[in-house]
Image (cartoon, rainbow, N blue to C red):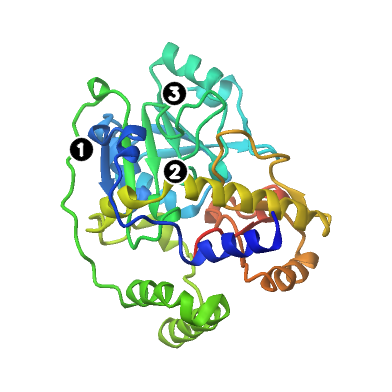
Amino acid sequence: MDSINYKYRIKQIYSPPFSSLITSRIKKIFNFDKMRFYSYGRYALYHGLISMGLINGDKILVPSLICRDLLASLNKSGICPIYYDVDKNLKPILNSQNFEKIKAILIINYFGFSQDLKLIKKYCQKSGCILIEDNAHGFLSCDPNGEYLGTRGDLGIFSIRKTIPLLHGGALYIKDETKLVTLPEQLDYYNYPSSYYNIKEIIRKLIPVIGIKGILLLSQLLRILRRIRTGHYIPVSDFKDEIELPLDIQPSINLLDKINKLNIDEEIIRRCEMYNWLNKIMAKFEVTPVFSELPNNCVPYTFPFYCSDKKVNLIKNELYKYNLEIFNWPALPEKLKNSAPMFYTNIWCVRFLW
């Protein structure tokens, strides 16, 4: 990417590409008749589990490399997580013992990179086990065969607000309604008051005037105001997030409008170009990307890489010159923190959406 182009792509982190007109292409990609929209992917998972007939005490296989807030969906429904590990390529490490007496298995497409589901699908077909594809990171990504991630299992979980700037926006994809015990209702859309979100939307519109540096300064001001109000610059995850779902469960009133007006081609190109450019930039620091290459059809959520604590500040300072920020992922469940492999805690990501 030349110098002009990368600056343009970085600008799109703060002002993603939207059209003023509603397009129909997104409806061809995702059959909305098979989707239910919620505020968060956590609610989509909860309603999906209930709709498939899972009840209190049932067991579900979930990866140990997982954000703690997903567990709130399981706790609310009384479903018990059984953990399996992943390797440094974030591929599942499974054996026959993992599958004893489970009703469902959850697979994560980490950072929008597809998991190979062939063997898992075969097991699920033989046993009747429910396959849930957690695609919170992979909106618009496909697997090598061109099949959209989140549509390959019995249920697909989306957190669209991680790809598109939304206050609330999650979705449940239902592959085959005949497998459902109950059909989840589509909740009404709601316009939640949020001064923080509204201010960010105003700031986005000011980019032509104040530039990205101005946005970063205003963003820092917002964080200072949050620190005064809550004691933290950014939202902090704690054990409560594993137990309780957020209070608001309805999707944002502008969710479908934002989805339909997204310039899909531009969004895909900008994320892939950012990833490939960062791959070259990060090579100078001798850090290891989580994935060795960007596959065809992959639309990356971020640029994920492994980094020791010693190098983090050096990389933060270097990327700040390009108006880029990094964050650590995930916030592991309390139960798994002390036993997690070291590489679980050394994953850092370059942010592709502000």
Q: Secondary structure at mark 1?
A: loop
Residue at 34% of width from left, 38% of height from top?
25
Q: Which residue is mark 1?
A: 184
Occupied quadrant, residue 7: bottom right
> Relative to the observer, which residue lies in front, 148 or 178?
148
The amino acid at mark 2 is Phe
> Relative to the observer, which residue lies in front, 142 or 129?
142
* Mark 3, other Cα within 10 Å: few <14 / some 14–19 / many ≥20: few
Q: Is residue 230 visible?
A: yes
| CA gap, disc 2 and disc 3 | 31 Å
Q: Position of residue 60 (x, y in %)?
A: 43, 33
Q: Of callouts 1 and 2, which one flags the residue occurring earlier in the amino acid sequence?
A: 2
Q: Which residue is mark 2?
A: 139
| CA gap, disc 3 and disc 1 | 26 Å
Q: Position of residue 6 (x, y in %)?
A: 64, 60
Q: Of callouts 3 and 1, which one flags the residue occurring earlier in the amino acid sequence?
A: 3
Disc nearest the viewer among 1 and 2: 2
Residue at 80% of width from left, 53% of height from top?
283
> Is 162 on the left-hand or right-hand side of 113?
left
User: In the image, is residue 68 above or below residue 219?
Assistant: above
The amino acid at mark 1 is Pro
User: In the image, is residue 224 above or below residue 180?
Assistant: below
Residue at 26% of width from left, 29% of height from top?
53
